[in-house]
Amino acid sequence: MGIFILALVLGVSLAQHDPHMKHGRTSIVHLFEWRWADIADECERYLAPNGFAGVQISPPSESIVLQNPWRPWYERYQPISYNLCSRSGTEKELRDMVTRCNNVGVNIYVDAVINHMCGAGGGEGKHSSCGSYFNSHKKDFPAVPYSSWDFNDGKCKTNSGEIENYHDIFQVRDCRLVSLLDLNLQKDYVRDKVAEYMNTLIDMGVAGFRVDACKHMWPGDLQAVSSRLHNLNTSWFPSNSKPFIYQEVIDLGGEPITASDYTGIGRVTEFKYSSKLGTVIRKWNGEKMAYLRTWGEGWGFMTSGNALVFVDNHDNQRGHGAGGSSVITFWDPRIYKMATGFMLAHPYGVTRVMSSFRWNRHIVDGKDQNDWMGPPSYPDGSTKPVLINPDTTCGDNWVCEHRWRQIRNMVIFRNVVNNQPISHWWDNGSNQVAFGRGNRGFIVFNNDDRHLDMTLNTGLPGGTYCDIISGQKEGSRCSGKQVTVDSDGRAHFNISNMDEDPFIAIHVDSKL
Ligand SMILES: *[C@@H]1O[C@H](CO)[C@@H](O)[C@H](O)[C@H]1NC(C)=O
Ligand SMILES: *[C@@H]1O[C@H](CO)[C@@H](O)[C@H](O)[C@H]1NC(C)=O
Ligand SMILES: *[C@@H]1O[C@H](CO)[C@@H](O)[C@H](O)[C@H]1NC(C)=O
């Protein structure tokens, strides 16, 4: 009986850890600031054919429109209401995107901003993405509606009303984060409004939520919202499917609030993964890739089944949030491809690939002066469409890391080796490492400053394989390097430290 009840309790909560990915697909791509119309096209023309499981979209809720600085990306993290018109498009375009992506088996995960509304200095008027009136000084948001009764200020005990000390969990949850008006999620009314917003999206067909700023909400309040959520829409998901929940909790250690406070509700973003992987690939602090043998829980990360992992995210790629200078981004493409390749080859966690826009980065004394810059846009502030070049890369300052051959092919690698354990680990005690995933795939990295020239046991069936980093299988030939695996599973790898991409990956679907 006791075991039965335990299983029931676990069954209910663990349900929200399941991303409901389809067709053996395994990775999410964050199409940061993309328009809904472009995402719908991308699902059909690129993501489904290349085995991407889902898209994290930018917040669809009505946000403030800021002019100083001009239309920063973070305006979308300052809600005005839960109306669904945003810089990415209208409600109709949002619905069309959800339907079209679902119809090709690509899930949509919504970035939900529910901790707060706009900043206290946001002003008064209709400078909002749907044109709804608000007054931040009076804490009046009639389009929800929220009034001054629905905010936490009475509970906050700091003089400034701001979070001043991250070692005081009451401040972190009840005071304002960078002046953002902090919703009182202890109130049933606020919980109901937030759940109503999320349920509208669930009914529309989304598969789950990235929940913003969870460190700043009480786990009990999040649980109360979560328990109000509908099951996923049965047009696309099995009945009784709970929405996937992954919570943004920045836990790099050293604070009383930890990621584990939230793992009962859903998955949690593992920021240590991003920061440590950067340190290792950059070879800072004496770190070496050989140490990645115990990557995952062995590095003090949360249990794999609770983790959502990434090389960089939209905050830490520009120095926001935490993570610091070790975080690797598209600005360092050679090591970025290696880091993303390692993440996608390694079984730990649910993986999220970043897809960014380029901005005028201008670093002075370690701080990017232009860290606020919004997406590529026209003079009137509207977001530019994503331009697709004839060679399949993107233009107009859309970076489209997910379309880089090395990254796209590693997304496919992860699908091919899904559920296989790590096998045949090898390293040279330094930064030359290799490992397999059962008998389905094998990857070799040379992040040292000399040649790698080794015969290794791959565990793969004998045959000729196409390296999916320098090229891929195209019909009956390889467009890049070729690897010959003998009947004992052994293969010779010769990787120069000067190669454009000093790593090689092969899998059973890249066999000629
Ligand atoms: C599920 O989606 C379908 C197709 O868009 C829609 O017709 C239906 O009303 C949705 N179900 C719910 C419960 O909203
Ligand atoms: C591994 O490679 C590094 C750099 O190329 C080299 O210095 C080191 O001697 C190698 N280690 C072993 C154990 O072969
Ligand atoms: C590996 O490549 C280096 C440099 O191109 C070459 O000198 C060496 O002979 C190669 N080793 C094998 C076994 O092919």
Image: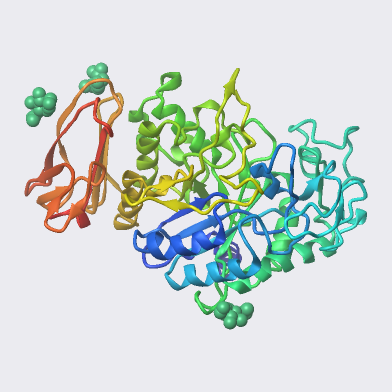
Where residue 234 appears, as percent x and y from the top left, is 54, 79
Left or right of 11, for residue 510: left
Q: State the image quarter where residue 416 is shown.
A: bottom left
Q: Nearer the viewer, residue 180 or 248?
A: 180
Left or right of 12, for residue 327: left
* Count of marks, rendered view: 0
- Quarter of the rendering occupied by the C terminus: bottom left
* Res. 19 visible in picture: no
Please tell me whether residue 334 is drawn above or below residue 237 in the rendered image: above
Q: Nearer the viewer, residue 452 or 262?
A: 452
Please tell me whether residue 167 is drawn above or below residue 416 in the rendered image: above
Splitting the image into four quadrants, where does ligand 1 fall?
bottom right
Q: Nearer the viewer, residue 236 or 127?
A: 127
Query: How is the protein colored in the picture?
Result: rainbow
Left or right of 228, for residue 338: left
Q: State the image quarter where residue 67 is shown.
A: top right
* Res. 252 visible in picture: yes
Where residue 358 appears, as percent x and y from the top left, is 51, 38
Residue at the farthest left position: 487
Where residue 301 appears, as percent x and y from the top left, is 51, 40
Q: State the image quarter where residue 172 is shown.
A: top right
Please tell me whether residue 477 is drawn above or below residue 367 in the rendered image: below
Where residue 304 appears, as percent x and y from the top left, is 47, 49
Q: Residue at x 50, y 59 (%)?
A: 38
Q: Residue at x 45, y 73 (%)?
A: 103
- Quarter of the rendering occupied by the N terminus: bottom right
Left or right of 143, for residue 18: left
Q: Residue at x 13, y 44 (%)?
A: 482
